[in-house]
Amino acid sequence: MPLVSITAHTSQSGEALARLGDAVHDALVTHCGVPAQDRFQVRRRVEQDELVFDPSFLGVERRDPVFVEITLRNGRTIAVKQALYRAIAEGADAAGIRKEDVMIVLRENAEPDWSFGNGIAQYVPGS
């Protein structure tokens, strides 16, 4: 059910982004109950002028930001979301990406908002 988009500067290696992608998926499985085989990700590296960010917004010192956008079905508690954020930050650190540089945004929606192919809303009974 989640669709993950990871965007970083070209200075981040493809290997580091792959490891971050693994960490994001592991965190979703562990903290959000996502099935292990339910993995859909887009990873992209862009030029510096394509990343616009404040280097110290809310007191976090950013140098080389990585944006993690997760679209998923609604219904998680604040505590679950906070655990997810912590796990992703720890995974980023293990991947060689500063946790201060990782910004995470959740986009929540409902079951009818998903089609996994064939023009069918698989989560809607009778589709």
Image (tube, rainbow, N blue to C red):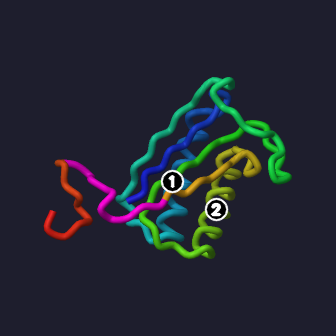
Amino acid under disc 1: Ile
Q: Are marks 1 and 2 in contact (CB under 8 Å)?
A: no
Q: Is residue 87 left or right of residue 70?
A: right
Residue carrying label 1: 70
The earlier-in-sequence mark between 1 and 2 is 1
Residue at 76% in and 49% down: 100
Residue 39 in percent (x, y) is at 40, 54
Q: Is residue 7 above or below residue 106?
A: above
Q: Is residue 24 left or right of residue 89?
A: left
Q: Could you say whether the residue bearing mark 2 is in a helix, strand or loop? A: helix
Residue 86 in percent (x, y) is at 67, 64
Q: Is residue 58 above or below residue 84?
A: above
Residue nearest the observer in this picture, 9 or 54 = 54
Instruction: Please identify the quarter of the rendering in which residue 81 is found.
Output: bottom right
Residue at 19% in and 54% down: 120
Amino acid under disc 2: Tyr
Question: How would you rate the neighbour count of disc 1 (Cα within 10 Å): few for under 14, some for 14-19, many for 20 or more?
Answer: some
Residue carrying label 2: 85
Numbered range of the magenta stretch:
108-117
What's the CA distance linking mark 1 and mark 2? 11 Å
Residue 88 in percent (x, y) is at 62, 57
Question: How would you rate the neighbour count of disc 2 (Cα within 10 Å): few for under 14, some for 14-19, many for 20 or more?
Answer: many
Q: Is residue 111 magenta?
A: yes
Q: Is residue 30 above or below residue 45?
A: below
Residue nearest the observer in this picture, 88 or 123 = 123
Q: Is residue 43 magenta?
A: no
Locate the N terminus and report the quarter of the image it occupies: bottom left
Residue at 64% in and 62% down: 85
